[in-house]
C-alpha cells in the first residue's frame, strides 16, 4: 500500500528520517510489524508502546485457547497503531472486536495497518478516551466480554527501575486502570513492564481468585509481561 500517510503519521524508509529517540525501535520494525515494508504507518509516540507482532500473536493465541468460549467480544482499550487488535482479529476467535484509541493519528495508522493485514473491517474502531467510552459498552453482557489493556507506562524510562512501581505508572496508575476495567468484565488482561511489581498485581485479586502472569520474550529476553485476571479454562 503506497498511499501517502497523513500529517503526523509516517512510514519511515530510512534511518535519516527517524527521530533519534525512535532509532532503537525502527531497527526492530520488522519484528514489530512483519509487513512493515508494505507501508505500515506509525506516529512517533507509538513506537515506544506498540506490541511486537510475535508477542501480539502469542497473546491472541493464548486468549483464543484459554478464555471460555461463551466470551466472544474483545475490547482493546489502548489500541495505539493496532498491533494487538490486528493479532486478535487474525486469530478469528472473536465475534466482535472493539478497538479504542484516544490519539486520532494513532487510530488512523491502526486502521491503515489493519488493512495491510486484511482485517480492517473485522474491527470496530472507536476514537476516544477508553475511560469515557467504556460506560457506553454497558449494553454488552458482562459474561461475553474480555478486556485487554496495553496502557502507557510513562515512557521508556520505566526500565530504569529494577522493580517498576505500578502505583506510579503515568498517566494512569494500575489501580485506576484495573478498577475501571474489572467493572465491565471479570476477564481483564494487562500488558505491563517486565519489571512490574508482582506484589502489586497480586494485591488486586480478590480472595480465592487467580492471576496468571506470563513473560513474553524475544531474542532471549523478556520484552513485557501479561497479567491475566479472571476465570480461564483449565488445561
Ligand atoms: P523497551 O524496553 O522500550 O524496548 O520496550 P526493548 O526493545 O526491550 O529495549 P532494551 O533497551 O531493553 O533492549 C519493550 C517493549 O515494551 C516494547 O516492544 C513494547 O511492546 C513495550 N512497551 C514499552 N513501553 C515504554 C510501553 C508503554 O509505554 N506502553 C505499552 N503498552 N507498552 C510499552
Image (cartoon, helix red, strand yellow):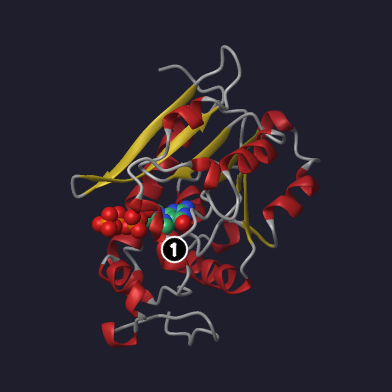
Circle 1: element type: loop
User: Which one is nearer the viewer's eye here, 148 or 125?
Assistant: 148
User: Which one is nearer the viewer's eye here, 126 or 229?
Assistant: 229
Rendered-image quadrant of the N terminus: bottom left
Dot 1 beta carbon under 8 Å from ligand 1: no
Where's residue 9, x and y in %? 50, 79
The answer to whether residue 51 is visible is: no
Q: Residue at x 34, y 53 (%)?
A: 160
Q: Judge from the rendering whether residue 125 lies leftward or rightward of residue 21; answer left or right.
A: right
User: Which one is nearer the viewer's eye here, 133 or 96?
Assistant: 133
In the figure, 92 relative to 26: above or below? above
Where's residue 57, x and y in %? 38, 47
Q: Judge from the rendering whether residue 175 lies leftward or rightward of residue 50; answer left or right.
A: right
Q: Residue at x 56, y 25 (%)?
A: 230
| Residue that protrudes farthest toward the left in the picture | 220
Rendered-image quadrant of the C terminus: top left
Q: Judge from the rendering whether residue 111 lies leftward or rightward of residue 64; answer left or right.
A: right
In the figure, 67 relative to 117: above or below? above
The answer to whether residue 165 is visible is: yes
Ligand 1's quadrant is bottom left
Q: Residues within 10 Å of mark 1 (few under 14, many from 20)?
A: some
Where's residue 139, x and y in %? 81, 41
| Residue that protrudes farthest toward the top in the picture | 208
Where's residue 137, x and y in %? 76, 45
Marker count (numbered): 1
Q: Residue at x 30, y 74 (%)?
A: 23
- Identify the residue position indicated by label 1 in the image: 117
Q: Residue at x 71, y 51 (%)?
A: 131
In the figure, 151 relative to 127: above or below? above
Amino acid at each position: 500500500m503506497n498511499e501517502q500517510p497523513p500529517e503526523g503519521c509516517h512510514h519511515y524508509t530510512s534511518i535519516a528520517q527517524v527521530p533519534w529517540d525512535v532509532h532503537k525501535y525502527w531497527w526492530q520494525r520488522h519484528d514489530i510489524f512483519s509487513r512493515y515494508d508494505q507501508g505500515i504507518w506509525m506516529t512517533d509516540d507509538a513506537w515506544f508502546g506498540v506490541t511486537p507482532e510475535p508477542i501480539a500473536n502469542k497473546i491472541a493465541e493464548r486468549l483464543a485457547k484459554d478464555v471460555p468460549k461463551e466470551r466472544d467480544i474483545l475490547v482493546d482499550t489502548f489500541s495505539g497503531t493496532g498491533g494487538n487488535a490486528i493479532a486478535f482479529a487474525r486469530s478469528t476467535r472473536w465475534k466482535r472486536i472493539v478497538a479504542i484509541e484516544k490519539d486520532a493519528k494513532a487510530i488512523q495508522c491502526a486502521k491503515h495497518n489493519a488493512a495491510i493485514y486484511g482485517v480492517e473491517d473485522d474491527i470496530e474502531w472507536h476514537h476516544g478516551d477508553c475511560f469515557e467510552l467504556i460506560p457506553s459498552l454497558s449494553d454488552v453482557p458482562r459474561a461475553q466480554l474480555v478486556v485487554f489493556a496495553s496502557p502507557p507506562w510513562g515512557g521508556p524510562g520505566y526500565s530504569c527501575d529494577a522493580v517498576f512501581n505500578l502505583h506510579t505508572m503515568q498517566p494512569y496508575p494500575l489501580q485506576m486502570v484495573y478498577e475501571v476495567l474489572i467493572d465491565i468484565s471479570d476477564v481483564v488482561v494487562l500488558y505491563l513492564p517486565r519489571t512490574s511489581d508482582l506484589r502489586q498485581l497480586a494485591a488486586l485479586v480478590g480472595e480465592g481468585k487467580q492471576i496468571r502472569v506470563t513473560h513474553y520474550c524475544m531474542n532471549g529476553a523478556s520484552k513485557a509481561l501479561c497479567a491475566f485476571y479472571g476465570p480461564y479454562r483449565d488445561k
